[in-house]
Image (cartoon, grey):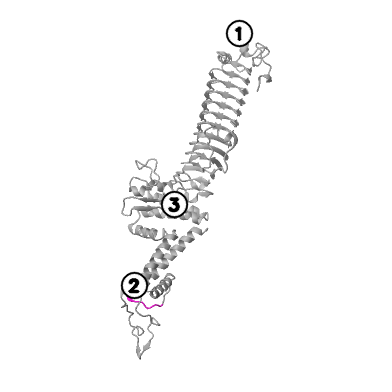
Amino acid sequence: MTAASWPTCTAESDCPGARFGSADHCFAHLAPETRRSVLAPGGDIDVRGVPFRGRLLDELLEGTQGHFGVARFNGARFDGAASFDGARFGGAAFFHGSTFGRDVTFTGARFDGYAGFGRARFRGEARFDRTEFTGRAWFRAASFGGAARFGEAGFGGEARFDGARFHGEAFFSRARFAENSVFGGARFHEDAHFDRTAFHGKWTGPFVCAGRIRLVRATVHSPVRIKIAALGMDARGIRLMETSVFWLRRATVDWADARLSQPVTLATHPVPFTGKLAAPAGDRPVDGPELVRIVDLSGVDASLLVLRDVDLSSCTLVGAYRLDQISLIGRCRFDAPPAGIAVGRAWFPVRRWTRRRVLAEEHHWRAAPTHRPLDRTGWRRHPRYATGEGIAAPADVATAYRKLRKALEDSLDGPGAADFYYGEMEMRRHDGGTPRGERGLLHAYWLVSGYGLRASRALGWLLAAMTTTVLLVVGWGLPDDRPQHPAGRAERTSGQAHPAAAGAEPRLTLPLRERWTAERAERASRLVLNSVVFRSSGQALTTAGTWTEMASRFTEPVLLGLAALAIRGRVKRS
């Protein structure tokens, strides 16, 4: 609003102040006696465009006793500190386009009608603590150069902060929004505090915050569908009473102990914010290609939580309720074991961790100081690593893996659930509370086939077993001759039965160095291949060969079955 929008003062050619009442001068150019005579508590005032210097504002407040009717401060300029503490505005209050050169306070003030601060400029600190806005509160496109304090403020009507710019910290802690609160296009250059704030109407955006947005123990009574770009969101203990959707950009989110009454979605906004919302602080952009990073979901009823395209690599999941009913949609990223090969001092000096999705709790447990240095190499430490506090026990981590596995299996994502099954078995294998016999079986199951999930490991053992069997059969299992029938059909030579054909035990008398022939290797290979598919080769064998074949017919089909099971676990969808 410009000075030309109202009849201006005639005392000076360049005075932008509006004429006060029937006078030709603005309030600033009235004689002191006249100013005192025209003011009364609860009366209407018109000080549009008036420059408030010296004690002029004090005179205005003394004459009205801080009680105004309709108050027009549009375009007014306050060069010094301004205090409206405890003031009451019985009618509409217009501060559109006003400029507050230094700190201004409205602590404990009350606006019974419309309160308009559109495009106002607060160059110092603006205090609206415990201010009551009964009607609409209009801060559209306002600029706050210092801290903006609305702690314990009450907004009885619609509150509009769309397009507002907060250069300092913004405090809305314990504020109450009875109607809609609009922050579309707002830009916070520092932290935005909404701790214990109550939103009864709709809370709308989008807005950006170059710092952290704090919603600790805030209460949202209406459905929310909001877009926020921020470096962090601390929403511990937030209460959401209706179905809500939070579209976020880049934020690191702490959602511990959130209380959900209806389904809530946390999702990464698919495209970066553009235009004025891309970087509210110039050199501090808040957008980027990263997924929204969630760091804590402990204490949350996960059955009401939908996570879409989020990073859970650092998320605490142990302690979440109904984790088996959580919904994971899209690119939900978990952490991975250390890459490469670690070498150190141990009974087996090499460590190579299989690739899979890993919970943050397993990282913290494996990096705990109670483990050997080689076993800790590459694993990410817990923030309280030195004391060991906060590190979940293997049994608790196994439970979290088991519930996540069920959640993915219920969503028909068998391959995704396989990694969580592997993690569950790993934690059971390392849990000191698991019976020793069961731990031995788990160790064998892990070593042979990676809990039925690593086909390469099972096939490697199968190849090794088959090679070993071939060598044993060639060296000690095949007899000197091969009879026509293993049961001993008589084969006569010069009127006498051959000893091997007459049912005598096959014998091996060849010297060791003469046993390694291509013909014997071919016969042994056929025997081994038959054993893999659990068939008898019909080959006469020595006693050692018979036992070798029996062992082969038991172990090798099992290894083949484990390899097939692992392959199926990676390709099945239901």
Kind of residue at badge 2: Gly
Q: Secondary structure at mark 1?
A: helix
Total numbered badges shown on the rendered structure:
3
Locate residue 291 relative to residue 21 in the image: left or right.
left
Indicate the quadrant containing the N terminus: top left, top right, bottom left or bottom right. top right
| Vertical comparison of 329 with 573: above or below | above
Kind of residue at badge 3: Tyr
Q: Is residue 179 visible?
A: no
From the image, tell me which residue sits under label 2: 475
| Quadrant of the image occupied by residue 369 | top left
Kind of residue at badge 1: Glu
Which SS does the magenta portion mostly show?
A: loop
Question: Which region of the structure is painted magenta?
Answer: 538-544
> Measuring 36% from the left and 45% from the top, which residue is drawn there?
368
Q: Position of residue 447 (x, y in %)?
A: 38, 59
- Real-space CA distance between mark 3 and mark 2, rounded to the nearest whole angstrom: 48 Å
Q: Secondary structure at mark 2?
A: helix
Mark sitting on residue 401: 3
From the image, tell me which residue sits under label 1: 33
| The magenta stretch spans residue 291 | no
| Vertical comparison of 355 with 559: above or below | above
Q: Is residue 469 visible?
A: yes
Ranked by sequence position, the earlier of labels 2 and 1 is 1
Out of 134 and 493, give the one closest to the viewer. Answer: 493
Are discs 3 and 1 less than 8 Å apart at CB?
no
Q: Position of residue 63 (x, y in %)?
A: 58, 13
Q: Which one is closest to the eye, mark 3 or mark 1? A: 3
Locate residue 24 relative to residue 296 in the image: left or right.
right
| Vertical comparison of 180 with 554: above or below | above
